[in-house]
Image (tube, rainbow, N blue to C red):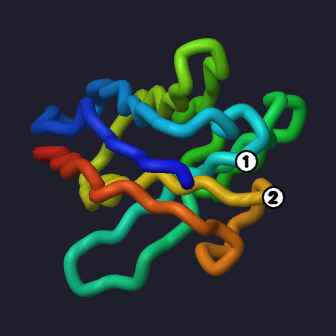
Amino acid sequence: QVQLVESGGGLVQAGGSLRLSCAASGRTFGTYALGWFRQAPGKDREFVAAISWIGRSIYYTNSVKGRFTISRDNSKNAVYLQMNSLNSEDTAVYYCAAGPRPTGWGGDYDYWGQGTQVTVSS
């Protein structure tokens, strides 16, 4: 069992940066792949980034490549999403998720956090 709690969301101006954190509980945290997803109002949830359990495999959706960076610290049971050059299209609730594989499909993830709101003002 893994419990995930996101933090770090907030209101930021376009062009600004935020760093999201996801704290996990559970002794097997280090064996899970971790992903970040987001859901904007009126839109489906979409994949943002994923990282394998040891951090060797990292994937991003095209719209955030070069702007977002996913990382993890297994010693702290945490995963992070550094978001730079934010724009209004990044406004959404961001969720972290844990699963056996670092994929872009939400169905591959077994555990989800409650989400943290990111709002980018133009």
Instruction: Give the quadrant of the N terminus.
Output: bottom right
Question: With respect to residue 37, does 116 lie above or below?
Answer: above
Q: Secondary structure at mark 2?
A: loop
Pointer 1 residue: 33
**Among the 4 quarters of the image, the one containing residue 10:** top left
Q: Residue furthest right?
A: 56
Quick check: 43 above or below 14? below
The mark nearer the N terminus, 1 or 2, is 1
Q: Which residue is nearer to you in this view: 35 or 2?
A: 2
Figure check: 91 above or below 55: below
* Residue displayed at 27% across by 60% down: 92
In the image, residue 72 above or below residue 32: above
For image coordinates 78% across by 40% down, the residue present is 31
Task: State the image quarter where residue 69 is shown.
Answer: top right
What's the mark number on residue 52? none
Q: Position of residue 91 (x, y in %)?
A: 25, 56
Mark 1 falls on what kind of element? strand
Which dot marks residue 101? 2
The residues bearing labels 1 and 2 have C-alpha atoms spaced at a distance of 5 Å
Callout 1, which amino acid? Ala
Q: State the residue in front, 1 or 104.
A: 1
**Residue, far top:** 75
Left or right side of 43 for 27: right
59 left or right of 97 in image: right
Amino acid type at circle 2 is Arg
Residue drawn at point x = 37 percent, y = 55 percent: 113
Residue 38 position within the rendered picture, expressed as x and y whole percent measured from the top left? 40, 62
Residue 116 in percent (x, y) is at 24, 49
Query: Do the residues under discs 1 and 2 have CB atoms within 8 angstroms?
Result: yes
